[in-house]
Image: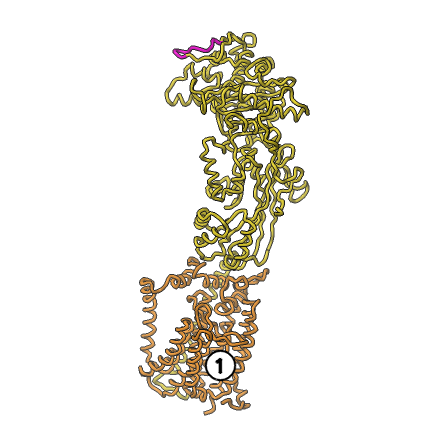
Chain colours: A yellow, B orange
């Protein structure tokens, strides 16, 4: 260099600068080596994941039919406004509550709560902002695409249940799987994710695995704002199985009508075919509207409605047929009579016991409602003689009564294909309570246990199962609602999934349970039950000439004698089957707190028999009771034609 | 001023340097097109290249000494541009910075890029006249003042990133003008000690804002930083680079980090990430080598310069360019916080491109006249 100056070491300094340049570029090279070769795979995966999104396609849920092919439950498409959290990118969810709540008319608090809830949960796909969006809502979302690109509209099938709470307790309802549920193993096994809609009650819950089908998905590529750019693959959903129930809509409507027309509007009517356990009607009143859960639960009004149901003293959400226990009253005398004869406490030749208008045990007199002399077993049933059965119970002793409950499955669940069935309570359980209190089981307790008070609490369904099983000679079928799970697709197709009929959840349980009742014993008891209706007994008011009903009234005390007025009136029972000597239908009715069984439950039962008679005999039943009030055709109009298995019809409005 | 092109000049013309520069721009244009396939940035870049090559040739075949002698005029002109850009209506405001002048037909023009060259000329002129001995404090102060004027105007835009690329120009010139080594050592030691301390104090006193901290955090630990907030740009850039692997990400779907808009500013600030994603490690190393070769070529030219002025103008350009390359790529690789500076020769942008080519033109002019004296 011509201008070089030794004092400045210029050559050295230039060399230094050159080294710095090389060093800086080398450092970048080292960093590139780390990012691309050492960690490249890792970053590539993350980059892939952030652009690939799985959008679920909800599988159409199966339709539920009655036994004649009338659709009971179906789905219709609705539109939901969804918020995709991936696209928020640090934006505060809380700040979005207000504009969304105002523009889409969603309740502020519900939306805020929902947003807060998902904030604490990782890896959420999207949040529901508004269900069942109106065309106005959809237009608003589309108009604000630039402002709120994270919003999108999705179509979703919504479950539609019959009006007026028809069959509500049987059908149940669907709802979103809850956060608590997702933590349970049962639900984990189902491979569910938050926001999935599953059956939460009734048949919807029990046969959820069949009804739900399997969701499909769209695998798409999205840009940084979540807008779909490309579709990689689509996996079509597998539709759920259709369900055919054993329900006979005509009988069901009649049964519900009877409960609505009853004195207290609270009660149960169950109709079963005793020869196979198929339930033709299961009515429980008061009822509720399952559409609340499938359609309105996300709204403020819906929640208020739900709270009202929970707080209603009449407990409309309870299926009284399987979730309420009542003292069986005199209906208890039927299994007592069979067991007394079988166990030899009485014999057919010498079945007479003293009525005595009651019985004196120690210093306590327990009275009979009449004075029946010294009746035989048949007469005792006809006139529901308590004194007779006090003494029969004392002869059978507690052990005999316990053997009876065991023999007739009265201490077990019936095994119905509905969730949350409770077990009836028998003297065994009550004695255990006394034992814990170190109280002695006395003869007076055996007396109470022998006429269906104090020491028995039965679900109406278990009472019906036992009595109808006795009616056909000792075969106790498991009552059930499933006639058929229909197959999906045709045999041979790749998508084909087979159907099935009813199967007990407990394969070890015999169906039917056979209780060998000697023919003459059976005959004697049935004669008594026949006499209840046909020979001037407690149910004589519902006699039907040519269609002999065998039955037994029951009047179950709720409180002590003398206080049985108003709200605390006795429960009115009537359990029956017909025709008496060749049963094809069995029917139980319980009207809560209405009074004497023969006055309330029996007429309700008769009116349902009338409907059955008209339907099967194609003629007017002899001496049909007038129907209290007609409310016209209450058949559900679900919008699905009876011969169609297709679930989703696109709404045209 | 433009000398008649002598046949000897053509022989001495640094073809390799020119081809390297043009080659990098062309490669960069491919990446710009990749980054913004739907926009016309890559076309503008090619037009810009044409203008830039012409400007480079004009400067190359001019006598750099004459140009540097009238450097004050360029310098003042540059300052004037920096003032004009601040006037609302003329200066274009983008992302809160009023740093662009709208040029009809071409788009916008960033004067701060261009003023780098005039400032380098001014510095070369001032320090090129001295003969020997260590720099006096007064000389250092004057050098500082020459730099301070444009920096002050740029800070008004405000564009801190650009300012950072100005400082190395002065540092290089001072270093090569014989500043005492102990000053250099002192400055380096102070910087190493004071910078973390200042950051610590800044965090404690709240002077360093939260989002600025996040931008630092994402560099220290990108996996656990605020990836959706202020760390987003760095994180997405790291992903884009990492996805490139050895040979570049070959996607069947044809969607990339930039086409899906995960990577912000892919045609300007993060053009290197786009390149890394497309061309992989091999491609990146080749580009780094190309830059290394180009800079070495310039330094070699500086060593052969006929006078101090020529050496200084080349080295000022080398210093500025090297630091800008390091800052830009370092930012793309998550080594440095996000600072909006373009990558010389690759980022889309007219001013940067022309300014860089003019700077190379200067180096060529110096080389063409190395035997003149």
Q: Position of residue B212 (x, y in %)?
A: 39, 64
The residue positioned farthest toward the front in the image shown: A629
The magenta stretch spans residue B57: no
Left/right placement of residue A444 relative to residue A210 reads left
As displayed, is residue B110 above or below residue A148? Answer: below
Of the pair A370 and B296, the residue shown nearer to us: A370
Name the image quarter holding residue A446.
top left
Q: Is any part of residue A428 visible from this angle?
A: no
| Magenta stretch bounds | A355-364
Name the image quarter holding residue B6.
bottom right
Q: Position of residue A612 (x, y in %)?
A: 63, 25
Say what secondary structure mark 1 lies in: helix
The crowding category of the residue bearing disc 1, from other C-alpha atoms within 10 Å (few below 14, some 14 to 19, many at least 20), is many
Q: Chain of mark 1?
A: B
Of the pair A494 and B37, the residue shown nearer to us: B37
Q: Position of residue B163 (x, y in %)?
A: 40, 74
Left/right placement of residue A492 relative to residue A368 reads right
The residue positioned farthest toward the bottom in the image shown: B373
According to the image, label 1 marks what residue? B358
The magenta stretch spans residue A356: yes
Of the pair B189 and A376, the residue shown nearer to us: A376
> What's the residue at 64%, 42% (across, down)?
A646
Q: Position of residue B232 (x, y in %)?
A: 45, 61
> What's the residue at 54%, 49% (across, down)?
A133
């Amino acid at each position: 260099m011509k201008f070089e100056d030794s004092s400045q070491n210029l050559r050295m300094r230039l060399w230094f600068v050159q080294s710095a340049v090389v060093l800086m570029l080398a450092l970048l090279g080292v960093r590139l080596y780390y990012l691309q070769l050492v960690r490249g795979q890792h970053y590539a995966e993350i980059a892939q994941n952030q652009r690939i999104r799985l959008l679920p396609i909800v599988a159409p849920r199966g339709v539920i039919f009655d036994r004649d092919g009338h659709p009971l439950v179906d789905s219709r498409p609705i539109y939901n406004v969804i918020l995709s959290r991936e696209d928020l990118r640090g934006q505060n969810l809380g700040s979005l509550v207000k504009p969304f709540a105002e523009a889409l008319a969603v309740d502020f608090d519900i939306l805020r709560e929902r947003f807060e809830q998902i904030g604490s949960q990782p890896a959420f796909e999207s949040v529901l902002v508004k269900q069942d969006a109106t065309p106005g809502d959809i237009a608003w979302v589309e108009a604000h695409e630039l402002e709120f690109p994270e919003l999108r509209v999705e179509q979703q099938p919504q479950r539609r249940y019959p009006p007026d709470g028809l069959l509500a307790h049987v059908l149940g309802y669907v709802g979103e799987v809850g956060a608590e549920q997702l933590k349970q193993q049962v639900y984990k096994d189902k491979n569910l994710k938050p926001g999935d809609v599953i059956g939460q009650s009734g048949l919807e819950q029990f046969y959820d695995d069949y009804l739900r089908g399997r969701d499909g998905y769209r695998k798409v590529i999205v840009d940084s704002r979540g807008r779909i750019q490309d579709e990689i693959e689509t996996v079509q959903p597998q539709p759920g199985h259709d369900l055919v129930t054993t329900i006979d809509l005509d009988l069901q409507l009649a049964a519900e009508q009877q409960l609505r027309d009853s004195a207290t509007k609270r009660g149960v009517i169950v109709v079963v075919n005793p020869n196979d356990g198929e339930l033709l009607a299961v009515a429980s009143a008061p009822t509720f509207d399952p559409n609340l859960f499938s359609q309105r639960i996300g709204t403020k009004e819906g929640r208020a409605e739900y709270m009202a149901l929970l707080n209603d003293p009449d407990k409309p959400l309870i299926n009284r047929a399987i979730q309420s226990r009542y003292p069986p009253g005199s209906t208890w005398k039927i299994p007592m009579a069979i067991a007394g004869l079988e166990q030899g406490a009485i014999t057919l030749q010498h079945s007479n016991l003293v009525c005595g208008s009651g019985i004196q045990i120690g210093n306590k007199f327990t009275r009979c409602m009449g004075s029946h002399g010294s009746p035989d077993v048949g007469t005792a049933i006809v006139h529901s003689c308590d004194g007779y059965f006090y003494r029969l119970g004392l002869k059978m002793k507690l052990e005999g009564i316990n053997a009876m409950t065991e023999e007739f499955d009265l201490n077990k669940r019936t095994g119905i294909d509905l969730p949350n069935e409770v077990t009836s309570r028998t003297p065994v359980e009550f004695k255990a309570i006394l034992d814990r209190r170190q109280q002695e089981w006395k003869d007076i307790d055996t007396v109470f246990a022998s006429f269906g008070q104090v020491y028995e609490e039965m679900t109406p369904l278990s009472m019906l199962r036992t009595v109808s099983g006795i009616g056909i000679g000792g075969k106790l079928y498991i009552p059930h609602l499933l006639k058929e799970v229909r197959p999906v697709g045709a045999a041979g197709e790749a998508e084909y999934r087979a159907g099935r009929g009813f199967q007990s959840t407990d394969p070890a349980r015999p169906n039917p349970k056979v209780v060998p009742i000697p023919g003459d014993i059976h005959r004697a008891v049935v004669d008594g039950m026949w006499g209840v209706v046909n020979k001037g007994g407690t149910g004589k008011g519902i006699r039907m000439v040519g269609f002999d009903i065998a039955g037994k009234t029951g009047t179950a005390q709720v409180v002590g004698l003398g206080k049985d007025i108003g709200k605390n009136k006795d429960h009115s029972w009537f359990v029956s089957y017909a025709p008496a000597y060749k049963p094809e239908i069995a029917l139980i009715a319980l009207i809560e707190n209405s009074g004497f069984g023969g006055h309330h439950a029996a007429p309700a039962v008769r009116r349902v028999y009338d409907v059955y008679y008209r339907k099967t005999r194609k003629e007017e039943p002899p001496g049909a009771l007038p129907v209290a009030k007609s409310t016209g055709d209450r058949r559900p109009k679900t919008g699905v034609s009876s011969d169609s298995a297709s679930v989703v019809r696109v709404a045209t409005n | 001023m433009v000398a008649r092109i002598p046949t000897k000049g053509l022989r001495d013309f640094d073809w390799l340097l020119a081809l390297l520069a043009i080659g990098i721009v062309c490669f960069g244009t491919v990446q710009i097109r990749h980054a913004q396939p739907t926009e016309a940035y890559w076309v503008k870049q090619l037009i810009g290249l044409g203008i830039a090559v012409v400007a480079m040739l004009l400067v190359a075949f001019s006598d750099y000494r004459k140009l540097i002698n009238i450097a004050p005029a360029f310098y003042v002109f540059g300052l004037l541009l920096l003032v004009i850009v601040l006037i609302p209506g003329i200066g274009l405001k983008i992302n809160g910075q009023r740093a662009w002048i709208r040029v009809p037909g071409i788009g916008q023009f960033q004067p701060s890029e261009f003023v780098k060259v005039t400032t380098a000329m001014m510095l070369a002129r001032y320090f090129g006249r001295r003969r020997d001995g260590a720099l006096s404090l007064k000389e250092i102060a004057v050098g500082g003042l020459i730099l301070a004027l444009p920096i002050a105007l740029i800070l008004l835009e405000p564009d801190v990133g650009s300012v950072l690329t100005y400082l190395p120009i002065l540092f290089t010139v001072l270093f090569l003008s014989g500043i005492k080594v102990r000053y250099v050592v002192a400055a380096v030691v102070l910087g190493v000690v004071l910078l973390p301390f200042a950051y610590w104090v800044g965090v404690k006193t709240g002077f360093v804002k939260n989002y600025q901290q996040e931008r630092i955090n994402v560099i220290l630990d990108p996996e656990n930083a605020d990836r959706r907030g202020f760390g987003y740009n760095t994180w997405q850039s790291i992903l884009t680079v990492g996805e490139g692997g050895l040979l570049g990400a070959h996607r069947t779907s044809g969607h990339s980090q930039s086409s899906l808009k995960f990577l912000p500013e892919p045609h300007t600030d993060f053009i290197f990430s786009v390149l890394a994603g497309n061309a992989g490690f091999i491609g990146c190393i080749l580009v780094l080598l190309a830059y290394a070769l180009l800079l070495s070529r310039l330094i070699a030219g500086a060593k052969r310069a006929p006078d101090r002025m020529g050496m200084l103008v080349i080295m000022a350009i080398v210093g500025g360019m090297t630091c800008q390359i390091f800052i830009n790529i370092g930012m793309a690789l998550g080594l440095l916080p996000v600072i909006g500076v373009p990558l010389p020769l690759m980022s889309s942008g007219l001013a940067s491109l022309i300014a860089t080519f003019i700077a190379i033109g200067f180096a060529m002019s110096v080389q063409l006249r190395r035997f003149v004296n």
